[in-house]
Amino acid sequence: MTENAAQNLREYRMAKPPVIEPHELRHALKVAAVTGQNPVRDVALLLLFHGTGLMPNEAAKLLVSDYLEANNRVRVESIVRAEIAFNGKARPLIWANAKTCRAIDDYLAYRLVARHGITTTPAAFRGLDDRSPLFLAGDGEPFAFTRRVTASGAVSYSCEVLAEIIRRLHQQAGIEHGGALAARRSFAVGLYRQGRSVKIIQELIGVSSLGAVKKLVESDPVTLASIVRGVI
């Protein structure tokens, strides 16, 4: 490999994930709704990642009770529990976006019909096991985690299956380099475009460094076309 090629590779690896514009997400949702083995779940997953900024490991470990109250209502003000957060610190998880909640509700209704993670007490948690993962693999089982051991002996687990699903849902819609990290950055940039403070964005995505959040959102590659598109 030449020095120039090596430099290009290093720059690519260091590049920020792309910002996915609203019209691109709308297209990805339309494609997801008519492709794959579980379109109801996949639409909900796309909106989950773009509407919360969650990481794949966090999303795979969400429980039904992180989304629903026992009385079947959506838990509007929830949390990413410390034990599932990527940095080990709890942070707010707000279920207030109507489109995201509607898609998740549709998926939970599908789960009930498919009998994926149901209980014998249908009056609570919409008939679902409150301790079961909010999202399941196609066979109704929890997503699998891959175990890795570093040279120093440290053990880590990653939900590569879910990360690959999110990557595929972007790729099939023609979005290059799309995936969970791109959805996470798009979530942060979307809040910043709305005029939300960097401090609020930091709290929602759980990044410890305020400077890192600023770099993430202030380098927004907004184009003249996207500005004009949103005028009316």
Image (tube, rainbow, N blue to C red):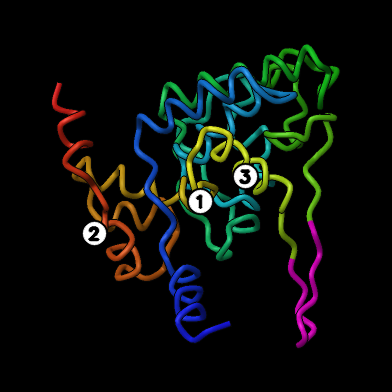
Q: Classify the position of the N terminus by image quarter.
A: bottom right
Q: Amino acid at mark 1?
A: His
Q: Residue at x 48, y 41 (%)?
A: 175
**Is mark 3 in CB contact (under 8 Å) with mark 2?**
no
Give percent across and percent down for residue 140. Answer: 82, 29
The residue tagged 1 is: 177
Q: Nearer the viewer, mark 3 or mark 1?
A: 1
**In the image, farthest residue toward the front:** 2
Q: Going from the N terminus, do you reach mark 3 or mark 2 first? A: 3
Mark 3 crowdedness (10 Å alpha carbons): few <14, some 14-19, many ≥20 = many
Q: Which quadrant of the structure image shows residue 206? A: bottom left
Q: Amino acid at mark 2?
A: Glu
**Is mark 1 in CB contact (under 8 Å) with mark 2?**
no
Magenta segment: 146-156
Mark 1 crowdedness (10 Å alpha carbons): few <14, some 14-19, many ≥20 = some
- Is 224 one of the magenta-colored residues? no
The residue tagged 2 is: 218
Quote the CA–CA distance across marks 1 and 2. Answer: 20 Å
Depth check: give the residue in front, 183 or 177.
177
The residue tagged 3 is: 59
Is the residue 128 above or below the residue 10 in the image?
above
Give percent across and percent down for residue 31. Answer: 55, 23
Q: Amino acid at mark 3?
A: Ala
Depth check: give the residue in front, 105 or 164.
164
Mark 2 crowdedness (10 Å alpha carbons): few <14, some 14-19, many ≥20 = few
Quote the CA–CA distance across marks 3 and 1. Answer: 20 Å
Q: Residue at x 54, y 47 (%)?
A: 179
Q: Nearer the viewer, mark 3 or mark 2?
A: 2
Q: Going from the N terminus, do you reach mark 1 or mark 2 first? A: 1
Is the residue 7 above or below the residue 117 in the image?
below
- Secondary structure beneath label 1: loop
**Is mark 3 in CB contact (under 8 Å) with mark 1?**
no
